Image (cartoon, helix red, strand yellow):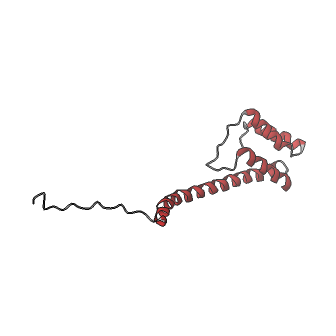
Amino acid sequence: MSKLSRKKKAAATPTALAPRDKAMLIGVPILLLAIPALVLHFSAIHQQTASISKTVTKWKTTYHINDEQAARIQQIEIAFHGNGSPFSIKPTRSKEEKHRHHEEISRLMSPEDGAHFMKAMEKDDGKH
């Protein structure tokens, strides 16, 4: 074949994607990442709330707490320990901050139960 007999091929024009196709190309991967992230987020929040609720329920009988006190203590616990979301930053607390946190909870209890609570929290190094 000689060079003259070859015809020059026309350059292929690039095909443009329709806006719907562009949206699908971008949207589907985002959804594939966002849905598991949301499920993880909400399940972690649920687990944290359930854990705090379980702890406060134990404290109700141990420290003679009524339902109103228990609800307030649960709010304090969530505010201090966080909602459990894996996307939030959990601050490192100092001993003094933990002590103030336990004092805040103990003030909602009777003086005797509050003292018992503080003693238990100091003994366990604030673990609850």
The tally of labels here is 0
In this view of the protein, which residue sits in the foreground, 108 or 117? 108
In this view of the protein, which residue sits in the foreground, 53 or 59? 53
Q: Is residue 122 visible?
A: no
* Residue at the image position 71 percent from the left and 45 percent from the top: 81
Quarter holding the N terminus? bottom left
Q: Left or right: 19 with respect to 74?
A: left
Instruction: Give residue 24's position: percent from left, percent from top.
Output: 48, 64
Q: Quadrant of residue 127?
A: top right
* Residue at the image position 78 percent from the left and 50 percent from the top: 75
In this view of the protein, which residue sits in the foreground, 115 or 75? 75
* Residue at the image position 43 percent from the left and 63 percent from the top: 17
Instruction: Give residue 22's position: percent from left, percent from top.
Output: 47, 62
Instruction: Give residue 10's position: percent from left, percent from top.
Output: 26, 62
Quarter holding the C terminus? top right
Instruction: Give residue 48's position: percent from left, percent from top.
Output: 68, 52
Question: Measured along the vertical axis of the image, is residue 107 above or below residue 22?
Answer: above
